[in-house]
Image (cartoon, rainbow, N blue to C red):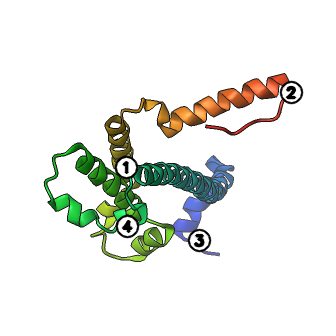
Amino acid sequence: MSTSAAGTDDFLDSALDPYQHCADAGRRDGEAAGLARGFTEGRNLGMKKSWEFRFELGYYAGFVEFVATEQGMDAKKAGCKFEEHVTSSGSTKEERLERNINGILHAIEEFPTSDDLQRASNDEEDDDSHQLDLPIQIQRIRAKFKLLLIQLGLPPTFSLANILNKQENKNSETSEAGEHANFDF
């Protein structure tokens, strides 16, 4: 019976460390389980963040449309006229307010949807990847919204985070008292 050098090395390796093959199999199984778990956690985190972004954008859109209506502007047409207002050099307070409202509505309209993100991930070219940087886009919308609050002379308590914290505190107080939660802003 002839043995090859590789067979002898395998035999010697298994004699020196008899549990190595179990460790190798465990490592492979662990990597596969880790990848599956990471995928699941990543997907769940992505879904949670997308809900948070949409909730925040919905708040901004509703607030801005209300302000536009109160200012006598047509909020539905405001987003369509955005390009026209960017080029004009309005210096009055009302024109700056209208430009900011139009800018916020336009930015919310242009915020990528799941279809845009799916299309970008399927494209082989990453030319548009800079346009899909969600944290940067949401930060720009937040900054424009803060500017709108300043232009309106409103305190920063109208930010979504403050309203949610206020509501959470109110809910915890009412639950301690045994009353039903009341969702008034």
Q: Nearer the viewer, residue 28 or 103?
A: 103
Q: Nearer the viewer, residue 17 or 167?
A: 167
Quarter of the picture holding the N terminus: bottom right
Q: Nearer the viewer, residue 52 or 184?
A: 184
The disc, 1 or 2, on the residue closer to the chain's N-terminal end is 1
Quarter of the picture holding the C terminus: top right
Distance from Cα at disc 2 to Cα at disc 4: 46 Å
Q: Secondary structure at mark 1?
A: helix
Q: Nearer the viewer, residue 172 or 103?
A: 103
Tag 2: amino acid: Gly
Q: Which residue is mark 4?
A: 77
Q: Which residue is mark 3?
A: 3
Query: Is label 4 or label 1 in front?
Result: 4
- Local packing at callout 1 (Cα closer than 10 Å; few below 14, some 14-19, many 20+) is many
Q: Secondary structure at mark 4?
A: helix
Above/below status of 95 relative to 113 = above
Q: Are marks 2 and 4 in contact (CB under 8 Å)?
A: no
Distance from Cα at disc 2 to Cα at disc 3: 81 Å
Distance from Cα at disc 3 to Cα at disc 4: 84 Å
- Local packing at callout 2 (Cα closer than 10 Å; few below 14, some 14-19, many 20+) is few
Q: Which residue is mark 2?
A: 178
The disc, 4 or 1, on the residue closer to the chain's N-terminal end is 4
The disc, 3 or 1, on the residue closer to the chain's N-terminal end is 3
Above/below status of 116 relative to 13 = below
Distance from Cα at disc 4 to Cα at disc 1: 19 Å
Residue 47 visible within the image? yes
Q: Which residue is mark 1?
A: 141
Query: Is label 3 or label 4 in front?
Result: 4
